[in-house]
Image: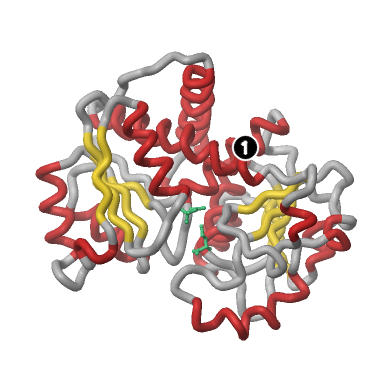
Amino acid sequence: MKRDFLALADFATAELIEILDLGAQLKRELKSGQRTTLLAGKTLAMIFEKPSLRTRVTFQVGMTQLGGYAVYLTPADIRLGERESVADIARNLDRLVDFIMARTMRHESQLELARYASAPVINGLSDLLHPCQVLSDCFTVRERRGALDNQKVAFLGDGNNMANSWISAAARFGFHFALACPKGYEPNAAILAAARADGAQVTVTHDPAEALAEADIAYTDVWASMGQEDEAEERKEIFAPFQLNTAAMKKAKKDALVMHCLPAHRGEEVTDEIIEGPASIVFDQAENRLHVQKAVLVWLNNQMTRG
Ligand code: CP
Ligand code: NVA
């Protein structure tokens, strides 16, 4: 059966754990020089409406390592919904490739691609969610801490695609997620309500100290996401009290780790001192995108052959 990877909320906890375990196995195998060809001859189309370093490279390298091939489509190549409708793009690619990964402006484009393609669609970031990033961040936390459910993750910043995906992850993995955001920058209300109905322990506050209290992980993301560049100056003032800096880190546990999905704007959401400091694990996070997304691809491929 075809499954898409659009939102963590679409998956049961056991399924996400299967993907994390598979990611750990693929990482071990790669590090020990073993190569698998689990996706030999398979092809992934990568649609990008926004720029990318990590998502593009990890998916492309991941497909190559698994014996497959990735086709990169730039924003200018297909102009989603402009040169051609999303539905037509989905139905064309569907005849040609085995998987579609898309980074889109609108989350609705993800849903439409998934509706019209019989190939699995993977959300490589939308305005609403960034499930690949947050699942690999959960992998990184589990790798460091051995478990997820005993962790408190504090997120300072915008109630954006990253925060929304963290909220859904909290519902599946049982950790405490505490978001400190400015008034007016709260996360998606429907995602928050659904996660809480599923038993998620989520705090939303406007006080960074409250979110950071007893935190095991301190997480942040850019203040102006891709597509919000014209709000960047205004946001710099609004978000200034939410900077992850040395004073803020004193509120968290002594051994708290610092995480950021990258790219980072040093001197804005995080200081140079903190992101370059010993608690920072941002490049582990970036690397783990590779292992976890390979696991997502293999897992989705396995689902296709199941009834
Ligand atoms: N974190 C992340 O998704 O990075 P890119 O925007 O470079 O893909
Ligand atoms: N919130 C950021 C995440 C980048 C990986 C953005 O959407 O630009």
Quarter occupied by residue 141? top right
List x then y, in percent, for residue 210: 82, 63
Residue located beneath label 1 in the image: 140
Residue 12 in view (yes/no): yes
Q: Quadrant of the C terminus?
A: top left
Whether residue 54 sits left or right of residue 234 in the image: it is left
- The residue sitting at 37% across, 30% down in the picture is 299
Badge 1 element: helix
- When the figure is inspected, residue 278 is found, relative to residue 247, above or below; the finding is above
The number of discs equals 1
The foreground one among 271 and 88 is: 271
The foreground one among 168 and 287 is: 287
- When the figure is inspected, residue 106 is found, relative to residue 130, above or below; the finding is below
Residue 80 in view (yes/no): no
List x then y, in percent, for residue 258: 73, 49
List x then y, in percent, for residue 289: 50, 40
**Three-letter amino acid code at disc 1?**
Thr
Whether residue 142 sits left or right of residue 25 in the image: it is right
